[in-house]
Amino acid sequence: MSPTYVLRKTFTATALMLAAWSVHSADAAPHWAYAGDHGGPKQWAELDPKFEACAKGTRQSPIDIRGAVKSELPALEFAYGSTEPTIVNNGHTIQVNFAPGQSVKVGDKTYELLQFHFHTPSEEQVAGKHAAMVAHFVHRNAAGELGVVGVLIQPGKSNAAYAPIFAHLPRAGEKITVDDLKLDLPAMLPTEKGYYAFEGSLTTPPCSEGVNWMVLKKPITLGADQIKTFRRIYNANARPIQALNGRIIKESM
C-alpha cells in the first residue's frame, strides 16, 4: 500500500524572489530570467551592481567539461541518510531544502548540505553535450565556502528515490512540507562517485565566484514522465555555457 502523506503548503511573496541557490538575501532582488532581452542572461549584470560578476567574472559557471586532467582527487565521502525535506518553487526552479545533518567530506573539508535543485537541460556540458537535466546539491562548509555536487540526469528507468519530489512539485511561490515523507539521499546519487572538479561560480545572479564544483561522471536516470513533469513547470532553466578562461578541469582517477 502506498503511504499516505499530509501536505502543508504556504505561499509567500518572498519565495518568488529567491534565487535557486537560497544562500543570498532576496530583499528587493531585481527580476531576472533565463531568456529574453529584458532580464535574460546577457542582461543579468545590468540589473544590479551586485550582479557585475555575471559579466566581468573570469571563473564563471556552467562550463563545457572537456580536456580534463586525470588527478589524484580526494574521494567524495557522503554522510547522507534519510531525511525530511521542504520543497520550494522559488520562481526559477524546484528546490529541496534540508535541516542540518547531511554532509560530504572532500579531503580535509566537510560541507553541510543546504539544498538541491534542478535545471533542464543540464547547465554543464560534457564534451559539448548537455544531459537532459541536472540536480545541483549545494553545500557550505564552516568557512562559508560553497561546494556543489552536480548529478547529471538522463532519460531512462523511472527513479524511485526521486519519486516523492515529482509527486509533490509546488507551484510558483509555494513551499510544501510533506508530513512523514522522507528522502533516501544515498539512493539519489549514482553508485560510482568519480567526478570532475573545477573552480566556478553560482550559475544564477549574483554569479559569485569561489564555488568548488564537483560534477559526478556517472549520470543517474529519471523516467520520461518524471522529466516531463518537471518540464511542464520549467521547460528551460539553464544558464548558457561560460568561457573556461584557462581553468584546469581535474578528473578523478
Image (cartoon, grey):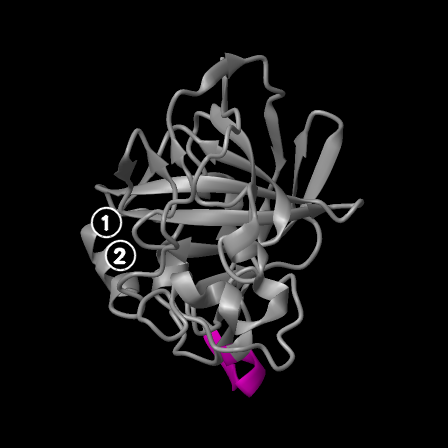
Residue lying at the far right in this picture: please name it. Answer: 143
Residue 202 in view (yes/no): no
Task: Name the residue located 49 percent from the left edge and 53 percent from the top edge.
Answer: 203
Q: In this view, does 140 lie to the left or right of 216?
A: right
Residue 107 point in image, percent of width and height: 70, 25
Query: Identity of the amino acid at label 1?
Result: Gly
For the record, the magenta segment spans 6-16
Q: What residue is shown with label 2? A: 226
Check residue 152 for magenta coloring: no
Q: Looking at the picture, which amino acid does disc 2 mark?
A: Gln
Q: Mark on residue 223?
A: 1
- Residue 136's spot in the image, x, y percent? 48, 48
Left or right, residue 57 beside residue 7? right
At horizontal 30% and vertical 51% (from top left) the residue drawn is 121
User: Which residue is painted at 37% across and 26% down in the image?
Assistant: 66
Give the position of the N terminus as an image quadrant.
bottom left
Mark 2 neighbour density, 10 Å: few (under 14) some (14–19) many (20 or more): many
Q: Is residue 73 above or below residue 93?
A: above
Q: Is residue 186 above or below residue 83?
A: above
Q: Is mark 2 on a helix, strand or loop?
A: helix
Q: Is residue 86 visible?
A: yes
In depth, the one of 91 and 11 nearer the eye is 91
Q: Quadrant of residue 103?
A: top right
Q: On the image, which quarter does residue 192 sit in?
A: top left
- Please say if 83 is above or below 77: below
The reply to whether the C-beta atoms of the residues labelled 1 and 2 are less than 8 Å apart is: yes
Q: Quadrant of residue 94?
A: bottom left
